[in-house]
Image: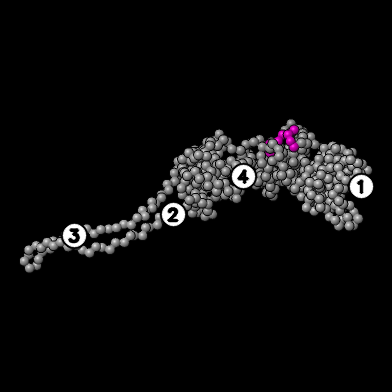
Amino acid sequence: MIRPISILCLVLVVMLAGCGAGDINTQPAQVNTSTQSPADGTPETTSSTPDPAVTESPTPTPTPSPEPITFALQNAPNETLAEEQLQAAIERWRSSEMVSQRIKLTDEVATADYRIIFRPTIKSCQGDKTETTFYWCLEENSDTVEVASRYIPGQQAELTERAAGAALVGQDYEGASFYDEIEEPQIDTPFLESGPITVAATSESNDIDATEYAALRDALSYWNKNASRYDTAWQAQFEIINDTRRADVEVRFVEDIQRCANSSDALGCAPIIGANEQITSQARIRIEEGYAKQSAEVIIQHEFGHLLGLVHGQEPLPLMSATYDAQLAGNIPNVDTRDYGFDDSVLPVYVDYETFEADQERVREEIVQTMEWYEDGNVESVPNDIRFTFTEEIDEAAFILRYNQTVSDDGFAYRIQPYGRSVDTDEAIEYYSTGIFRFGSDTDTLSYYFAEGSGYMIANTATLDDAPPDGVRESEYEEWPE
């Protein structure tokens, strides 16, 4: 464990004592004076008592409130988060009763009492040096507090709290009731700079073509959305930039990967970065070019899985399997010739429940009937591992279901508008992406028509000859509609 430097500098807070609240009365003393008579020189002693002085109670002088201790932030990877963490730290120190003076954040860096500066690593502090990093540092007689900034948010908040305490109460920060020794915190990125892991693409033969760029973009989007579901060593927050010199990761598309580790027939090659490893130079990923967009995307996803610390055989599978049957560009069958219309066996369904006349539970029951019917293998051309899910994210849906009475007014039980994408060099669609349903039939026939309509896209059928048989669902209908 890296022990932070003990902070020896103590801030002295001078508090002005308030005056008492009672009146102050002054009584004049009796004055005896000796004078000499000008006539005979005989001293004459007289005693006189002057009129009492008029006394008034003075107005107490207000005690000025001490100026607050001010903190300013600099170089925070995420300024909003850093402000929230520092504000929480300030409140905690105030509630500990170890600090009586007001404390506030300010944007005036030049006049702030303390500047908290975030740095990826802190190599020296108060004359000591380390090969790794100090967690924070307050140099003696300095208004600058450095905080290492490469850690996951919860632990970053602890470091900020300790650093603020070191400035506010000096070495006494260890006496706070909430103080615990910090175990070695988890780094949020293996690279020196916190924040998004920057990625830039290049090619050894020519400029990056649109297919390769789209595959890279979608592969990074996949990990940004899904990494938290798996046992990755790092949080995924990737961002594409155009400058290969500044990027944390360079993705290079090459004609051939002659060797990667123990493989001589690799589609891609990337380093496996384990937890808390620190990368001091740019990481490089090689991707063999010439593959269709879908295949290129899978290859890139796989290699970035390695970058996040995953090895072959770990979830998500089959993505992290050791082998993959990639399709060359221009060699992917168009959607109208395929047995299965999607490129993924997981099909999210978004239901606009507010448009249906029946309650949500009843609508959901009907849709589940269709889902289970496909998942039970009732259509031969559908993959065995097909799985439907409900989603609240309309942009992620393979099917969007709405009710629209005007459809039935036209004499149709439903209409479906399919959308697809081309992933190879020709313009024809290779895969469906989304189907938007508009139903005009009543809810009790919803499962049948969803099964029939989705069959156009799932199994490429104009009609399903093996449509759901009698008894598949419970409803007032004894048979499925013809």
Distance from disc 1 to disc 2, alpha carbons, whole Å, reads: 82 Å
In the figure, 196 relative to 411: above or below?
above
Could you tell me the amino acid type at mark 1? Pro
Residue 127 lies, in percent from the top left, at 48, 39
> What element does badge 3 sit on?
strand
- Closer to the N terminus: mark 1 or mark 2? 2
Is any atom of residue 262 visible in this view?
Answer: yes
Residue 469 lies, in percent from the top left, at 91, 41
* Nearer-the-camera pick, 106 or 276: 106
| Identity of the residue drawn at 9% across and 62% down | 43
| Identity of the residue drawn at 87% across and 52% down | 441
User: On the rendered image, what quadrant is the N terminus found in?
Assistant: top right
- Closer to the N terminus: mark 3 or mark 2? 3
Q: Which residue is mark 2?
A: 65
Distance from disc 2 to disc 4, alpha carbons, whole Å, reads: 40 Å
Q: Quadrant of residue 227?
A: top right
- Closer to the N terminus: mark 1 or mark 3? 3
Residue depth check, mark 4 versus mark 3: number of the one nearer the observer? 3
* CB contact under 8 Å: marks 4 and 1: no
Question: Residue 194: which numbered mark, if any?
Answer: 4
Residue depth check, mark 2 versus mark 4: number of the one nearer the observer? 2
Could you tell me the amino acid type at mark 2? Ser
Q: Which residue is mark 3?
A: 31
| Identity of the residue drawn at 86% across and 51% down | 442
